[in-house]
């Protein structure tokens, strides 16, 4: 029985043969220009040729993707000696990355019409198209099905975000980062609910025996940032102790500092005991070799980049990110932004950071002192005994909603109740959004953006 395997080249006169001849002609023209002499002022023709070839490469890869899709649909690989289209591409000069990109696009040509159109019109590159599709598919596979039962709707939301970023000139690295944020951008409600669950189940536990103790703590991402920042600020550099031992000693020092600050006696451990050794360990503020400079240029604090769109709950907005890369839900971003040092950063998707504004506290010292004089403790509506000196200034009407930083619009809240306030507000916001989606009735209480207390630059970017 004769084998059906096709081993010869393209038959003479076939479309494949004509394409090969056309490509050979293009390459001959490109090679010819290298030996050509150009007169003064005509060297821009080299750049023109490079631009034409680069644009043609994207069109060629799109043609390969469409052809790969047709091959799969028709079963044309049978008899070709190849098990996969990717294998056929690799054998004929494509790298593994190129073959993967082409097959990814081939698999999803019908799923991402806007992205494909943007690539065909030259608004995004083929590699960006493939990367956007791959990132979107990961997000679709891991989506909260109870909130987004329709995969096509979720895919469309993800496509819009990725195409918008690619058209703005985002690098591949930035596109990957945005792709990793798609679940939080598309469904901040789910992010908020998981954060609330971690917060509600927070806790700490002591277990003791005759020789020592074990301390465990668990909770939400915001609390982690606060605890880690405090401990790392008190952790001495390597000095023979393990990192676990240095963190433990830092925790002990934090507790010791708190007792001293409150004028309370610090228990004196028995000479030669492990506790005595921990308290005698080097302190960050007593390093002899210039250790103070290792703390950084400012006092220890949680550093957070918060896009203004995230504060305003704009659909698809980039989530808040800590300097450790941790993504925080909207309520966490809002609670940190209540009383903090703000610095406006203006960025461009291509140029990156283009302007840094002046730093400014949302609540100046004079207002905090005025609040402490009239409110001796946290002003949480349900009652709270945390003293004013441990509290934060809080806007009753948030500054991003148009509230001013004045005593009339201010109150003192402890950190826990500040976070609780914003979590409750976001829960009400998402309940209203669900109600509107079910009934079609517009929620007149929807939160909107606004100005600030006299700094007109902050509503543009924070």
Image (tube, rainbow, N blue to C red):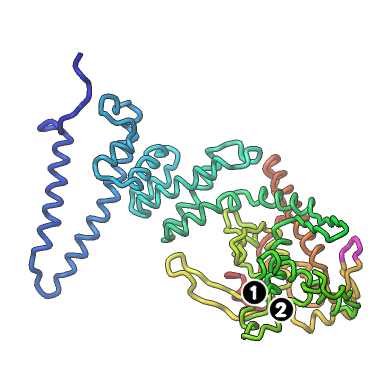
**360 with respect to 421 (left or right):** left
In the image, residue 116 lies at what x, y percent?
A: 38, 45
Query: Residue 269 falls in which quadrant of the image?
Result: bottom right
Question: Label 2: few (<14), some or many (≥20) within 10 Å?
Answer: some
**82 with respect to 110 (left or right):** left
Write down the residue under mark 2: 282
Farthest residue toward the front?
Answer: 272
Of the numbered discs 2 and 1, the one sitting upstream in the chain is: 1
Q: What secondary structure is marked by label 2?
A: loop
Figure quadrant of the C terminus: bottom right
Q: Measure the C-alpha gap from mark 2 to mark 1.
A: 9 Å
Write down the residue under mark 1: 239
Figure quadrant of the N terminus: top left
* Residue located 71% across and 53% down the image: 195
In the image, residue 420 lies at what x, y percent?
A: 79, 59
The residue stretch that appears in magenta:
380-384
Q: What secondary structure is marked by label 1?
A: loop
In the image, residue 75 lies at what x, y percent?
A: 32, 26
Q: Are marks 2 and 1 in contact (CB under 8 Å)?
A: yes
Closest to the observer: 276 or 102? 276
Closest to the observer: 279 or 440? 279
């Amino acid at each position: 029985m004769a084998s059906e395997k096709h081993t010869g080249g393209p038959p003479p006169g076939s479309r494949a043969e004509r394409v090969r001849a056309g490509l050979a002609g293009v390459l001959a023209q490109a090679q010819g220009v290298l030996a050509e002499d150009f007169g003064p002022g005509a060297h821009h023709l080299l750049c023109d040729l490079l631009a034409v070839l680069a644009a043609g490469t994207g069109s060629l890869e799109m043609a390969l993707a469409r052809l790969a899709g047709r091959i799969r649909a028709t079963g044309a690989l049978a008899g070709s000696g190849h098990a996969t289209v990717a294998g056929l591409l690799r054998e004929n000069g494509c790298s593994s990355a190129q073959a993967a990109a082409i097959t990814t696009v081939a698999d999803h040509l019908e799923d991402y019409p806007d992205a494909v159109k943007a690539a065909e019109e030259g608004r995004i590159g083929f590699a960006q198209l493939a990367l956007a599709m791959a990132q979107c598919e990961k997000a679709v596979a891991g989506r909260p099905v109870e909130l987004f039962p329709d995969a096509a709707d979720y895919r469309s939301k993800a496509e819009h975000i990725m195409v918008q970023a690619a058209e703005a000139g985002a690098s591949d690295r930035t596109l990957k980062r945005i792709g990793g944020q798609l679940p939080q951008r598309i469904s901040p409600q789910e992010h908020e609910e998981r954060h609330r669950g971690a917060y509600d189940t927070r806790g700490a536990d002591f277990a003791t025996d005759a020789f020592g103790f074990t301390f465990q703590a668990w909770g939400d991402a915001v609390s982690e940032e606060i605890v880690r920042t405090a401990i790392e600020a008190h952790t001495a550099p390597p000095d023979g102790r393990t990192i676990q031992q240095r963190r433990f000693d830092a925790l002990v020092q934090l507790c010791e500092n708190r007792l001293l600050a409150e004028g309370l006696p610090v228990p004196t451990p028995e000479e030669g005991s492990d506790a005595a050794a921990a308290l005698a360990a080097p302190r960050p503020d007593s390093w002899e070799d210039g250790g103070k400079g290792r703390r950084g240029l400012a006092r220890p604090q949680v550093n957070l980049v918060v896009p203004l769109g995230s504060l305003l709950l704009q659909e698809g907005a980039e989530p808040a990110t800590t300097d450790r890369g941790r993504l925080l839900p909207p309520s966490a971003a809002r609670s940190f932004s209540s009383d903090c040092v703000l610095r406006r950063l203006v960025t461009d998707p291509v140029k990156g950071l283009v302007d840094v504004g002046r730093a400014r506290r949302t609540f100046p010292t004079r207002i905090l002192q005025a609040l402490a004089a009239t409110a001796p403790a946290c002003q949480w509506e349900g009652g709270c005994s945390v003293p004013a000196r441990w509290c934060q200034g809080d806007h009753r009407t948030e500054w991003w909603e148009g509230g001013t930083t004045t005593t009339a619009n201010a109150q003192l809240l402890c950190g826990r109740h500040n976070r609780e306030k914003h979590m409750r507000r976001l829960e009400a916001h998402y309940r209203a959004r669900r109600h509107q989606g079910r009934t079609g009735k517009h929620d007149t209480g929807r939160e909107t953006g606004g100005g600030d207390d006299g700094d007109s630059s902050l509503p543009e970017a924070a």
